[in-house]
Amino acid sequence: MKVSTTARYAGTAVALAGAAAIGLAAIAHAQTPPPLKIGVMEGFSGVYGDLTAGEVEAMQMAVEDVGGKVLGRSIEILSADHQTKPDVGASIARRWYDVDGVKMITGLGTSSVALAVRKIAQEKGLIDINTGAASADLTGPACSETGAHWVYDTYALAHVTGEAMVKAGGDSWYFLTADYAFGHALERDVTAVVKDAGGKVLGSVRHPLSTQDFSSFLLQAQASKAKVIGLANAGQDTINSIKQAGEFGITKGGQKLAGLLVFATDVQSLTLPVAQGLVLTEAFYWDLNDETRAWTKRYRAKKDKLPSMLTVGVYSSTLHYLKAVQAAGTDDAKAVMAKMREMPVNDVMTKNGKLREDGRLVRDMYLFEVKSPAESKGKDDIYKLVATVPGDKAYRPMAEGKCPFVK
């Protein structure tokens, strides 16, 4: 079959146009920067599941607040449940950093998991920002040049709640302690506070994480005759401890319970008749001011529950990280961390916060007392503010932390 010269030219023109279009598409694709990947890893199930619900939504809010992009790059969120297991958390972190290209991981509740992930992040030279675990060792022996500890730690919990209880006359203590890194660190730090104030620790008993029956542990604490029973646990373990202590008549007998890590969501689970009078430390409360109320309203449009300080911690850490990436002009971990330390932290939870060299975010902490049913104006009206403790008073001085790279 003969093809006319005109047809040949037309076919050539079409082919050239197609090749040009493919080439332009390839160039455009090559010029489109890859997304910046960030991850939130938590114990989304199990003993801490109620506390961590909503953290993905909080991270989404931080992304929205920087306009959905940094350095012209879209932002992609990954999330995973470490099931409160250190080996699972370490495996997820390794895959995220090595395979998925994640540049920052936040959340990381459960100290044993956080310490395992910290080792992986140090090995990779990448960023982990801990918002959920409490062990102050994360800015001490386990500190990292690319790691941060954002919301609270065992030192601050011990000094804010512990000191308040001792000053109120609670000079003899007995501990119910969750038997893993967090509980041990919290008992250690509160013990130091009690002894420094001239008080005594009469003993302690350690319980398995996520146990259902606290009867034998509570009976030992009751038999100690200590004025204060310190609950060095968290989440559902704290809720069960307090409920079962009520069933044994421990507080009616004159002993006080010190909830050393209690969240607003815990108080709502307990209800005010059970929790009233409990003194506790928080980094955030929804009803502090107009800004906290507005943020909470926006959050509840995404997740209709009261935010815990863990939820807001993920928002705060993510927002500061993204601002630092923009300011640094790169996602290089050391450059970003340098900017995070240089820039003051200002958001709904933290005002003029300072990220120290050892990774500790220094910010105000709040001492609250749970309201009685008669004092409350509604189901979310649960706290009255007792004291605002400045960050330099709440957190351990950097020189005492024994962080290896801090001179």
Image: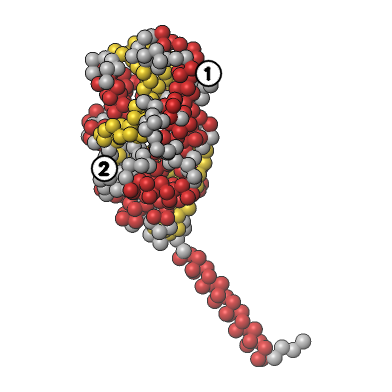
**Residue 178 in the image: above or below residue 201:** below
Which residue is disc 2 drawn over? 354
Residue at point 30% right, 22% down? 165
Residue contact between numbered discs 1 and 2, judged by CB atoms under 8 Å: no
Type of residue at label 2? Lys
Residue at point 42% right, 38% down? 378
First in sequence: mark 1 vs mark 2:
1
Q: Examine the image and state in which quarter residue 361 appears.
A: top left
Residue at point 53% right, 31% down? 46
Q: Examine the image and state in which quarter residue 362 appears.
A: top left
For label 1, count other residues whose C-alpha is less than 10 Å away and answer few (under 14), some (14-19) or many (20+).
few
Observer able to see residue 184? no
Residue 145 percent coordinates (x, y): 32, 40
Quadrant location of the C terminus?
top left
Instruction: Judge by depth and name the residue closer to the eye, 102 or 83.
Output: 83
Q: Examine the image and state in which quarter residue 169 appears.
A: top left
Residue 157 percent coordinates (x, y): 33, 28
Disc marking residue 213: 1
Type of residue at label 1? Asp
For label 2, count other residues whose C-alpha is less than 10 Å away and answer few (under 14), some (14-19) or many (20+).
many
Observer able to see residue 151? yes
Instruction: Judge by depth and name the residue closer to the eye, 249 or 373.
Output: 373
Label 1 – label 2 distance at C-alpha: 42 Å
- Say what secondary structure mark 2 lies in: strand
**Residue 323 in the image: above or below residue 198:** below
**Residue 118 in the image: above or below residue 193:** below
Question: Could you tell whether 404 is left or right of 273 in the image?
Answer: left
